[in-house]
Each structure stands twice: as structure tokens, then as C-alpha cells.
């Protein structure tokens, strides 16, 4: 993009980008709300299902796509940087990235992004530096709901191919005052702020009154209906939009922060992050080739959930008729309802003035096919989600041995493995951004294989961070364990490598104790060697 140099023209151009990126946001948000209701309650507001079949499927599938407790990383250096010094430092760098993955809570937040990407179609992970009061820089990570994110071209699925993206953030007044306390135009910015309207009708977060060349930029805020899982808005919120647009003259990303009819900040990305790299990663297990926002599994399962709920409702009505069957009363005279009510009590009796009077109940029967029909709908739900009974801990029909069960799970999980590889690639992208931030802002020292200290800034910046051995996907863990034991038996790896491949509990302590054990063995072997030499020298002297 070529940006205007005139201040007013630049404002119109930036607002035009915001308007373009926010196109379709209200429709998407309505879709997200519906998908969330189906995930949490099995149906939309007012028609929640008795049995929610979607939530366990989403939770189980996301657990198979990403395993936060076992994920590991390794560093792949380019041919130009593949020196002996770099090689000795890669293990320490990989461990630093793995530690930072947990310290920044990326392990749990990325898992949340994976789960809600199956609900909404995709999720956004954001990683940004934040200065502390002691002037040191922390790396903070955020899970971003896609309704707060916008792209310039929604028909392009890759985030890296976008010309501009937007991130909408909401702050209370105290946060805003802290953020702009040193800004030279603080008074004008405060005047331009658009406040939340608590009395606005129920709707979603949308941008209103924004169009190319508009004179006023205002934010229309949503007041959620009061219900489960909806936060109550007790204070006014104010909206800021961060616009990340690629500046062709700059040759890098340019970041604008907009609120009201005002550009609060305008700076190159290198001032707030890493040059040439957006701080966002799209998490999406099932991509659409012509739609940025991905494919929602909940949207695929909604019709089956409604079908299942309708049939369960029919079964419930039938069971009620069995417990309280329709009754025909003949010849009981007037007020037969009271007489029937008295008759149905324990020990109840009834008298009839008519000798031919009778009471007849019509008790329906529950067909056996009904249970099979409902079970088949349940199977369709599993098939639509690429899940198998074995993934829910149930035995597959026809399996008799553990080997057969493992083999069937491996075959049944083929589709899940493909989606897991997509998630693995996105985890690598997050780790790559994390590495670049650590390299730029972290002053901590790392130990290489020779025991020497170095900083990440001394490590090459063009290395690639990889997920080690598909460790992010639980479907690969058993295969990796068997492979590790086979390599150990063949003498192809060391004991330290075996421990890291198996990722046991207290891994760090085991590695530390292993060094002690190896050192003790070396000392014992050296002692035996010295004793043997002393014995040989003693015999030689005696002879």
C-alpha cells in the first residue's frame, strides 16, 4: 500500500482500511454466537438440548489435535549458519523456547485457540512485547476471538498474504489514561473517544458510521443479553483499533492505532515488535481454500444435534405416555376426571352408577428400533467429526487384542492426523514469533553443550523453529515412544535423548540425576581401571 502524506488524507485512508476489514463483521458475529450456543448448550437461546452431543465431541477432538503437556521444539539452522558453535547452542535455545512457551501461558492459550477454532472456524493468537516498570520487556500472549479481528481480503486464507489486518480492543477509562498519559494530543484523543451505550439494543460488536471519506468515526457497542456465560458491563468501554498495513515505501508493516476520528499512534512495526513479522497467527484445523475464517465443526454438527434433540423429545413424550397413559372412561357419569384422579391413587376405588361402566388405558409400546435409530444418529455425529468410538475410550466392534485396538485407532485417526499437522504448523509459527521476540528483548543467558553462557541475541535470527517429533499431537505420542525405545536398543541415541523423547514427569530432575549417575559410573570405572593397573604393576614387580 502507498500511504498519503497529507494528514487528513491519511486519516481517511486508514479509516477506509478499517471499514474494509470490518465488512461482514456483524454477520460473522451472529454466526459465532449461534455456534457458541450450540457448543455450550446444544442449541440456541431458549432451545437448549437435554443432551448436548456437540460439546464432548469438540473437547475430545481438540484434545487429540494438541497436547500442551508434551509439546517440544527444536531449532533448524540454515546451511550458512550450520556451524559447530551453532550446533552446540541449538539444544539450549530449544529448551529456552519450550520454557517460554509455558511461561507466557502459550501452552494453555494455544489449546484454547485450538478448541474454539473448531467452534468458530478459526482463532487468532497474538504475541506482543510489554514493558515492565523496571524497563525490562515481557512477552505477553493473547487469545483473540475472531469477531475482534478483521482482514483486508477475506477470500485469501493465508494471514501472511493479507495487505492489512485490524485488531479491535476495548479499554476502560483508567487504562486509556495510562496508555496516553504522555501523548502530546491527549486532550483531543479524549474528546474523540466513543463511549459504550449501555442502553443500546441487543446485537454484537460492530462498527457503525464508517465508510470511505466519512467525517465521523464512531463505535457502536453491544450489550449482551443477561444469561449464562455473558459478562455484565458495569463500566463504559472505549474502542481502539490497531491497523497493521504493509507500507510499500517502508518495505515493512506500519501500525496505526485509531479511536474516534483520530489516529492516536502511527509507527513502523519495528518500534513495537519484530521487523517484517506480524504478531498474529491464525489457528485453524480445517481451512477453506477461498475463505479466511475457516470451517466450523459446530456448524457441521448443528443439524445432527437438532435431529438428535427432536428424536429424544419424541422418546420423552412416548415415555410420558407409558408412565401416564391415555385413558378412556365409559359410563362413569359426570365429573369423571375427579373420579379417575381418585382411582389412580394408591388403593384408589371408584363407583359407577352404570353397570357397564369401564376404564380402559391405551399404553403405547416403545419400539426396539427407536433405540437403534437414536444410536445411529449418535454414530453419524461421530462420523461427521472424524471421531471413532475408540477415541472416546470405547471398544471398537471386532477388536480382541491391544494390538488390534492400537492399529484400528491409527487407521481411524488418519483424518485427525492431517488436521493435527495443520495445528502443528501453526504452533511452529507461534514458536517462531516467540523466538524472534526472545532474541530481541530477552537478556537471559543460556548454557551451550560446552557449558559456556551466551545470549539469544548471539544466535542466528534466520533459524526455523520446529515442533519436535510431532509432539504436539497425542495420536503420534505412542508411535514416538516406540520409536525412541527402538533407537535406544539400536544404540542410535543417548540416554539423555531418550528421556527427552519420552517426556516423563520430572524430566529436568531425571536429566540432572542422569548426569550424576553417569559421573558416578565414570568415577567407578576409573577406579577399577586404576586398581587393575596397580595389580598388573604389582605382579610385574614380584616377577
Image (cartoon, grey):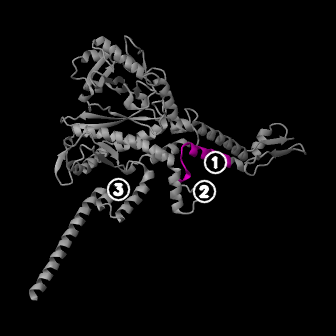
Asked which quadrant contains residue 319, the reply is top right
Query: What is the number of the mark on residue 501?
Result: 3
Residues at marks 1 and 3, CA–CA distance in whole angstroms: 41 Å
In the structure shown, which secondary structural element does the residue marked by tag 1 occupy? Answer: helix
Q: Are marks 1 and 2 in contact (CB under 8 Å)?
A: no
Residue 469: percent from the left, percent from the top? Answer: 37, 51
* Badge 3 vs badge 2, beta-carbon distance below 8 Å: no
Residue, far right: 355
Callout 1 crowding tier (Cα within 10 Å): few <14, some 14–19, many ≥20: few
Disc 3 is placed on an element classified as helix
**What is the x, y in percent for residue 373?**
67, 46
Which image quarter is the N terminus in?
Answer: top left
Residue that numbered label 1 is attached to? 375
Main SS class of the magenta portion in the image: helix
- In what quadrant of the picture does the C terminus appear? bottom left
Residue shown at 56% from the left, 57% from the top: 395
First to last magenta residue range: 371-390
Residue 370 located left or right of residue 438: right
Number of marks in the image? 3
Residue 493 relative to residue 420: left or right:
left
Q: CA distance from mark 3 to mark 2?
A: 33 Å
Q: Which residue is mark 2?
A: 397
- In this rendered view, identify the residue nearer to me: 500 or 31: 500
Dot 1 or dot 3, earlier in sequence: 1
Relative to 341, say whether 147 is above or below.
above
Residue 123 appears in view: yes
Q: Residues within 10 Å of mark 3 (few under 14, many from 20)?
A: many
In the rendered image, the residue lying farthest to the front is: 79
Q: In the figure, 224 relative to 377: above or below?
A: above
Query: Residue 190, position in %: x, y?
Result: 29, 18
The first of marks 3 and 2 along the sequence is 2
Amino acid at each position: 500500500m502507498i500511504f498519503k502524506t497529507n494528514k487528513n488524507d491519511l486519516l481517511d485512508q486508514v479509516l477506509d482500511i478499517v471499514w474494509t476489514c470490518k465488512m461482514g463483521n456483524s454477520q460473522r458475529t451472529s454466526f459465532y454466537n449461534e455456534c457458541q450456543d450450540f457448543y455450550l448448550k446444544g442449541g440456541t437461546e431458549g432451545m437448549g438440548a437435554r443432551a448436548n452431543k456437540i460439546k464432548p465431541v469438540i473437547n475430545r477432538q481438540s484434545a487429540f489435535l494438541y497436547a500442551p503437556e508434551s509439546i517440544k521444539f527444536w531449532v533448524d539452522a540454515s546451511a550458512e549458519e550450520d556451524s559447530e558453535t551453532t550446533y552446540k547452542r541449538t539444544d539450549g535455545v530449544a529448551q529456552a523456547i519450550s520454557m517460554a512457551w509455558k511461561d507466557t501461558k502459550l501452552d494453555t492459550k494455544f489449546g484454547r485457540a485450538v478448541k474454539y477454532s473448531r467452534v468458530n472456524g478459526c482463532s487468532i493468537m497474538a504475541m506482543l512485547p510489554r514493558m515492565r516498570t523496571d524497563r525490562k520487556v515481557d512477552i505477553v500472549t493473547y487469545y483473540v476471538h475472531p469477531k475482534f479481528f478483521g482482514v483486508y481480503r477475506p477470500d485469501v486464507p493465508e494471514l501472511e498474504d493479507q495487505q492489512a489486518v485490524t485488531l479491535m480492543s476495548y479499554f476502560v477509562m483508567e487504562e486509556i489514561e495510562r496508555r496516553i498519559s504522555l501523548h502530546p494530543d491527549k486532550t483531543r484523543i479524549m474528546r474523540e473517544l466513543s463511549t459504550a451505550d449501555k442502553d443500546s439494543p441487543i446485537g454484537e460488536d460492530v462498527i457503525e458510521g464508517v465508510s470511505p471519506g466519512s467525517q465521523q468515526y464512531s463505535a457502536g457497542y453491544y450489550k449482551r443479553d443477561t444469561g449464562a456465560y455473558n459478562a455484565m458491563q458495569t463500566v463504559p468501554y472505549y474502542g481502539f483499533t490497531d491497523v497493521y498495513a504493509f507500507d510499500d515505501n517502508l518495505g515493512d508493516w506500519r501500525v496505526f492505532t485509531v479511536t474516534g476520528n483520530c489516529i492516536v499512534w502511527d509507527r513502523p512495526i519495528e518500534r513495537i515488535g519484530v521487523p517484517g513479522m506480524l504478531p498474529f497467527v491464525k489457528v485453524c484445523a480445517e481451512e477453506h481454500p477461498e475463505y479466511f475464517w475457516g470451517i466450523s465443526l459446530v456448524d457441521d454438527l448443528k443439524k445432527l444435534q437438532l435431529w438428535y434433540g427432536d428424536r429424544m423429545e419424541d422418546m420423552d413424550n412416548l415415555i410420558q405416555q407409558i408412565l401416564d397413559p391415555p385413558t378412556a372412561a365409559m359410563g362413569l357419569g359426570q365429573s369423571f376426571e375427579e373420579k379417575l384422579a381418585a382411582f389412580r391413587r394408591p388403593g384408589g376405588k371408584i363407583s359407577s352408577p352404570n353397570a357397564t361402566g369401564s376404564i380402559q388405558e391405551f399404553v403405547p409400546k416403545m419400539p426396539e428400533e427407536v433405540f437403534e435409530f437414536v444410536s445411529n444418529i449418535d454414530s453419524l455425529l461421530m462420523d461427521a467429526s472424524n471421531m471413532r468410538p475408540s477415541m472416546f475410550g470405547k471398544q471398537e466392534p471386532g477388536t480382541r487384542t491391544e494390538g488390534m485396538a492400537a492399529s484400528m485407532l491409527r487407521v481411524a485417526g488418519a483424518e485427525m492426523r492431517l488436521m493435527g499437522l495443520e495445528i502443528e504448523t501453526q504452533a511452529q509459527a507461534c514458536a517462531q514469533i516467540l523466538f524472534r521476540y526472545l532474541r530481541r528483548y530477552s537478556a537471559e543467558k543460556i548454557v551451550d553443550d560446552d557449558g559456556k553462557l551466551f545470549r539469544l541475541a548471539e544466535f542466528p535470527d534466520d533459524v526455523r523453529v520446529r515442533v519436535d517429533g510431532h509432539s504436539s499431537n497425542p495420536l503420534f505420542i505412542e508411535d514416538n515412544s516406540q520409536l525412541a525405545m527402538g533407537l535406544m536398543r539400536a544404540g542410535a541415541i543417548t540416554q539423555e535423548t531418550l528421556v527427552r523423547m519420552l517426556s516423563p514427569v520430572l524430566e529436568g530432575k531425571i536429566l540432572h540425576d542422569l548426569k550424576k549417575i553417569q559421573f558416578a559410573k565414570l568415577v567407578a570405572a576409573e577406579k577399577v581401571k586404576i586398581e587393575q593397573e596397580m595389580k598388573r604393576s604389582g605382579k610385574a614387580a614380584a616377577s
